[in-house]
Amino acid sequence: MSRPKNQSYKGHGLSKGKEREQRASIRFKTTLMNTVMDVLHNRPGWVEVKDEGEWDFYWCDVSCLRENFDHTYMDDHVRISHFRNHYELTRKNYMVKNLKRFRRQLEREAGKPEAAKCDFFPKTFEMPSEYHLFVEEFRKHPGITWIMKPVARSQGKGIFLFRRLKDITDWRQGTASKKFASLEAQPAHAATTTVNPSGSQDTRSSDDQKDELPVENYVAQRYIENPYLIGGRKFDLRVYVLVMSYLPLRAWLYRDGFARFSNTRFTLSSIDDQYVHLTNVAVQKMSPDYHPKKGCKWMLQHFRQYLASKHGPQVVEALFSDMDNIFIKSLQSVQKVIISDKHCFELYGYDILIDQDLKPWLLEVNASPSLTASSQEDYELKTCLLEDTLHVVDMEARLTGKEKRVGGFDLMWNDGPVSREEGAPDLPGMGNFVTNTHLGCVNDRKNQLQQLFRSLQSQKKASS
Ligand SMILES: Nc1ncnc2c1ncn2[C@@H]1O[C@H](COP(=O)(O)OP(=O)(O)O)[C@@H](O)[C@H]1O
Ligand SMILES: [Mg+2]
């Protein structure tokens, strides 16, 4: 975004020389019609801009990114709600590719124990390009369950479970199934495996590539067969992480989130029943057992309390600290790949599954977590989450930049771990370093915001 201002670009923001504080109003634009729109409309001093008008803040969906980045000059203060190549983290195949590469890098630079801290994603293969590697792995563990997921879809669409190779050869007619069938006929070790310059393996022959029609990419992933169950039901967690910058990495963790439950008792005997295995709200809502009043969510606070009463606080601390590790390592795995543009921020929705050993697994990271509310409680959570996101993004330029907490957000990483103690150095390893994360803890955001803005105002008065 360092290109000079040019007549052919739509200009956004104020002309040079005007300070952020001097803006009387913030002009926003959005493509979303849900809680985002409500929160933006209700924010004091913010005004909506329609169509081609100039804007300072744009909450857009990922599909509108290209146009904005390619044809827009942006002033320093302008902000947009995604990183340009967010998909490096938010597409299922790229996320795994980046995590595998990061794990190899850690092993080289810091040894095996450090690399093992990345072992939080189920074994995953990209399809069809890693089909042969997958088959080798498949044959090593006969009888286990696998899950096939399209790399770029969401809400459980296109997902299915399988235990036989035949199930995936049947899965797609046309090019994909022909490719799978012909590859099947060869022994796995005879596949032409080439290593491309980026280091990833490509098992396709050049003829395959030449004749290839576009095939939707999938990942084949080991299915977690022993999910932690509550009331006999499977669930996964949705956690919100706000990244303000990748270089240096600066990330905030939201205190609230929720567990999304299946309405049907868990069993491995019916792998075709999506209501048992997929915990997406979009799936569960269609289930015959769904009660619109009851919904299928538990707030994270409730979940954390439940676990603490069952297993004790130490076990819960360990689980939540393992989750912190997932957030940080996954962000670090793309730190050098994502284009760190100061105009961008991103509110990610992490999907985490916990197994019966209380190990958390990363299933995926969403660039556009659903911000549509499914109940009053959900509406409140999402509205507060968005308000606090805007406080951290700080278009109004009220913060000092030294805050460790803003509403429900705690600063989790600031080019290194952040200490919970006020005034303590943000470097681990000395004394009792406790990280500044409070996932699933009390979220007294209103009080905190009042105090924060009061003290910012008095600081401002004192300095003027
Ligand atoms: N490896 C896995 N093991 C167990 N359950 C899984 C696994 N991957 C996905 N699921 C279930 O399927 C749901 C959808 O998978 P996800 O990867 O989040 O894709 P989507 O983009 O469709 O939401 C998850 O919320 C979870 O309930
Ligand atoms: Mg998901």
Image: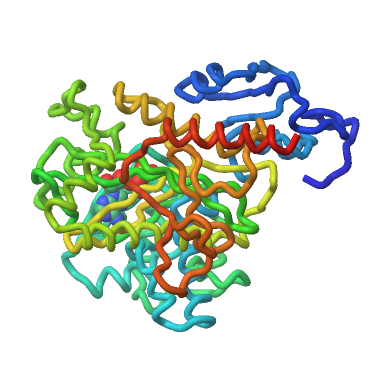
Q: Give 92 or 205, whichever is nearer the viewer.
A: 92
Query: For residue 122, which quarter of the picture?
Result: bottom left
Tell me the residue at 57%/24% (across/down).
31
**Is residue 163 depicted above or below 368 in this figure?**
below
Q: Quadrant of residue 425?
A: bottom right
Outermost residue toward the front in this view: 462
| Quarter of the displayed picture in which ligand 2 can be seen | top left
Q: Is residue 101 visible?
A: yes
Query: Residue 272, percent across and down?
Result: 18, 45
Query: In front: 245, or 147?
Result: 245
Residue appearing at x 31%, y 31% in the figure: 282
Instruction: State the residue in front, 463 or 360.
Output: 463
Q: Horizontal and vertical percent for residue 438?
A: 37, 50
Q: Quadrant of the C terminus?
A: top right
Q: Nearer the viewer, residue 253 or 51?
A: 253
- Total marks in image: 0
